[in-house]
Amino acid sequence: MSIRRAVPADAGALAVLAERCFREAWDQFNTPANMAAYCAANFTVELVRDDLERPNVRYLLAQREQEAVGYLRMVPGDAPRCVRATAPIEISRVYVLRGWHGCGVGAELLRNGLEEAMRAGHDNAWLAVWQRAPRALAFYRKWGFETVGTARFALGSDVQDDFVMQRAL
Ligand SMILES: CC(C)(COP(=O)(O)OP(=O)(O)OC[C@H]1O[C@@H](n2cnc3c(N)ncnc32)[C@H](O)[C@@H]1OP(=O)(O)O)[C@@H](O)C(=O)NCCC(=O)NCCS
């Protein structure tokens, strides 16, 4: 497996991957209308290209034999008040195609992301994760993240409860 920084030319493939991962994970818990609204607001090729072009947003792409199977998105900057840090970075998404879950792809993405964040001088990584996502919570705990607060996340018209987790770097 290879991990590399995604660039604007990856927008088409990344948009397809991101929507597919998101739907595989959350379709079963949400209404079609809320899922469609969220995907339209986040995963069009144009929106993903704009995001890739933002200087402060970093994407890592995991590939197995040329197939994109997972990605990580991270953004330095503001953190919720419960996160104690001087130079925080948000791990805003880690997603792996369902067929590849449990194969170490998420671990490789996170390891690379945290190493890159450390090299860039960040002292803390934080994230928000749905309180009803036990596998994701187990994955982050295994990586040393601890819960420090709660947050709200809007999926279409549905407001959901997240945990805020952090890990010193
Ligand atoms: C959470 C996620 C990124 C983990 O990636 P992954 O490639 O499956 O994780 P790894 O194979 O590196 O690590 C597996 C560990 O993650 C957890 N895990 C998460 N999902 C799992 C799954 N479907 N099968 C097995 N283990 C899973 C377990 O704690 C496991 O620990 P173990 O190795 O001690 O059994 C991935 O399962 C995923 O994309 N889930 C759906 C989307 C999501 O919840 N994203 C995070 C919230 S934004």
Image (tube, rainbow, N blue to C red):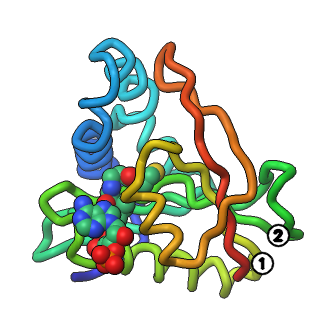
Estimate the x, y position of residue 104 in percent, counting from the top left. 28, 78
At 64% from the left and 77% from the top, the residue drawn is 117
- Label 2: state its secondary structure: loop
* Residue located 61% across and 56% down the image: 127
Front residue of 13 and 53: 13
Report the front residue among 7 and 133: 133
Residue 148: image quadrant is bottom right
Q: Give the secondary structure at mark 1.
A: loop
Residue displayed at 77% across by 57% down? 77
Is disc 1 in contact with disc 2, using a CB cutoff of under 8 Å? yes
Task: Please state which amino acid type lies under the numbered disc 2.
Answer: Ala
The residue type indicated by label 1 comes to: Asp
Q: Position of residue 107 (x, y in %)?
A: 38, 77
- The image quadrant where one finds the N terminus is bottom left
User: Closer to the camera, 32 or 16?
Assistant: 32
Q: Which numbered dot is residue 123? A: 1
Can residue 27 be seen from the camera position used here? yes
- Viewer-nearest residue: 40 or 104: 104
**In the picture shown, does residue 119 fall above or below 78?**
below
